[in-house]
Image: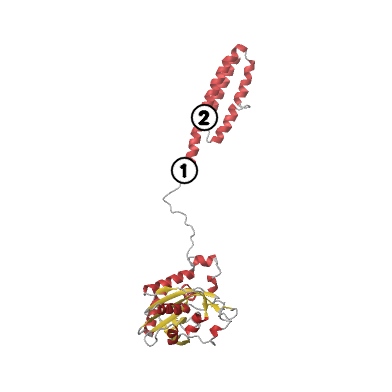
Amino acid sequence: MSELDALKVALKTLQDKALDEFSNAESLQALQVLRVSYLGKKGELTSVLKGVGKLPPKERPVIGQFVNASKQTLSESLEKREACLALKEKQVRIEAERIDVTLSGRTSSKGSLHPVQQGLNEMTAIFSQLGFDIAEGPEIEDEFHNFDALNIPQEHPARAMHDTFFFHPDGDEKANLLRTHTSPVQIRTMKACVDAGGEPPLAVVATGRVYRCDYDVTHSPMFHQVEVFKVDKNISLAHLKGVLQHFLSAYFEKDVPIRLRPHYFPFTEPSAEVDIACVFCHQKGCRVCKGSGWIEVLGSGMIHPNVLKSVGIDSTVYSGFAFGLGVERLVMLKYGIPDLRLFFENDVRFLRRMGA
């Protein structure tokens, strides 16, 4: 066999081997390795072509055409296999990245109202359904609206500096203070009605922040209160008890037994503290109710004639009831919260538990 024929056979054998390996390549990376192995500068084809120099000059063009045809065949085979593998890998990637649009979306954490605000909204909604109007007043008050008009005498402990946040007056100015309850809204609402030439009936619920010098597991220097009052002809304790029974049962979402115990408040006469049957032990006796089966929740009573007189309402014609409650206290009882300070510490675990 001549040198030319031997070279042709070697090239044909190399081509067949390369085509077979190209067609069996499983990835683009493997195909690239084969490209370099056969067609690279140090590849097998280059090694075979080293024998061209041994051929006579007239035979070299013949082998050159054969080599070019072989390179063309190998290049076309590589391109076809490369396109096939690229399409295959694309399909695999698409399948791996497929999104099932029928699946539920990822839930994201959303903020919500603070537990105290939730409680305020629930309470005002109950009273609104009973026909009470919502009123607000300033948090910085004067002594007339916060004390005098509410029949609170000068020597009453509530006026003491250790109980009330006073602003020290300059010169002859009257002292202002951070209101200690929402009852001043009662005075302002009744007085505004009279000054405008109106007269009862009045049914109002006042909400807002109040301030007192106190801080422990059940008291805070700032807390929220709801003041409810109604003034009309022939209002009695029966009306007060009926509203209280409805409100407390609606708020706790079950029938809650209540009782009124005689008490003293300067702005009501007669006055009563309101207890509810313990929502934890159902009157069997527990640590929360101290074994009594009852929990005190708010103060109430019939509006004192002196309070009506201070705003210009005739107490011989009109009467009314009023009661005030601490929002945080009722929220604590409803949800079993042991420490009032949790409302103000912004502990994310507590807020998430409460849905805030």
What is the residue that sits farthest to the top in this orientation? 58
Q: Hey, which quadrant is residue 127 in on the image?
A: bottom left
Query: Which residue lies under the disc numbered 2?
Result: 79
Q: Hey, which quadrant is residue 251 in on the image?
A: bottom left
Query: Which residue lies under the disc numbered 1?
Result: 95
Q: Amino acid at mark 1?
A: Glu
Which residue is nearer to you in this view: 84 or 150?
Answer: 150
Residue at x-position 62% and y-position 23%: 47
Q: Residues within 10 Å of mark 1 (few under 14, many from 20)?
A: few
Residue 80: image location, x then y, percent: 49, 30
**Mark positioned earlier in the residue sequence (1 or 2):** 2
Residue 334: image location, x then y, percent: 46, 74
What is the residue that sits farthest to the left in this orientation? 234
Residue 294: image location, x then y, percent: 45, 82
In the image, is residue 277 above or below residue 83? Answer: below
Secondary element at tag 1? helix
Q: Residues within 10 Å of mark 2 (few under 14, many from 20)?
A: few
